[in-house]
Image (tube, helix red, strand yellow):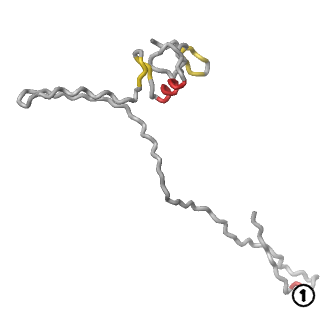
Amino acid sequence: MSHEMVQRHGSPDFCKDCHGVEGASLPTDCPGSPLSSSQLNGVYRGELDYRDGEWLNPRAPAPAPEAAPEAPADSNTVHFETEVEVPDLEPEPRIIHTTETRYVPVPIPIPVPIPIPINTNTNTDVDNTEFEDAEVDVGINKR
């Protein structure tokens, strides 16, 4: 059964009967009734499709060709080769368990001396004798 598409402004078209959305969850043929949420998800993921009146898995491997009956060794035999197209399957995610410790370098702030200007101009009006032995103590506060 073919889909009866309904056009929506600014959104993808959808089937009036099965409610499949074009480009996302639209099976090849219309089943004629609304799709269940599991069917919608299966069609969206490419694991389910509706064709020729039945649900099938398009990722399932093709059935192996039947083996020809073995002929006696002294008879004339004919061998046929067949190519079977197998769909690409996504690899299963691999979970890695490890006890390895990994270190991440973290920058550590190193104190940097900051020059502080000190007035060295001597004023002749001021008596410098009281400042001759003075020391300057500068501290830096970090946040």
* Neighbour tally class for label 1: few under 14, some 14-19, many 20 plus, Cα within 10 Å: few
**Image: 134 above or below 114:** below
Q: What residue type is labelled 1?
A: Thr
Seen at 47% across and 47% down, the residue is 95
Q: Residue placed farthest to the left in the image?
A: 74
Q: Could you tell me residue 102's position as x and y percent?
A: 53, 59
Which of 55/110 is in front?
A: 55
Left or right, 80 with respect to 30, comes to: left
Which of 118/40 is in front?
A: 40
Left or right, 10 with respect to 97, comes to: right
Q: Is residue 23 visible?
A: no
Q: In which quarter of the image is the C terminus?
A: bottom right
Q: Is mark 1 on a helix, strand or loop?
A: helix
Which of 106/92 is in front?
A: 92
Q: Could you tell me residue 116's position as x and y percent?
A: 78, 72
Q: Quadrant of the N terminus?
A: top left
Left or right, 73 with respect to 58, comes to: left
Q: In which quarter of the image is residue 19?
A: top right
Q: Could you tell me residue 52's position as x and y percent?
A: 40, 16
**Image: 142 above or below 2:** below
Seen at 88% across and 84% down, the residue is 131
**Image: 78 above or below 8:** below
Q: Residue placed farthest to the right in the image?
A: 125
Seen at 44% across and 40% down, the residue is 92
Which of 2/39 is in front?
A: 39
Q: Can residue 132 be seen in this view?
A: yes
From the image, tell me which residue sits under label 1. Answer: 129
Q: Quadrant of residue 125?
A: bottom right
Q: Could you tell me residue 84's position as x and y percent?
A: 29, 29
Q: How many labels does the image show?
A: 1
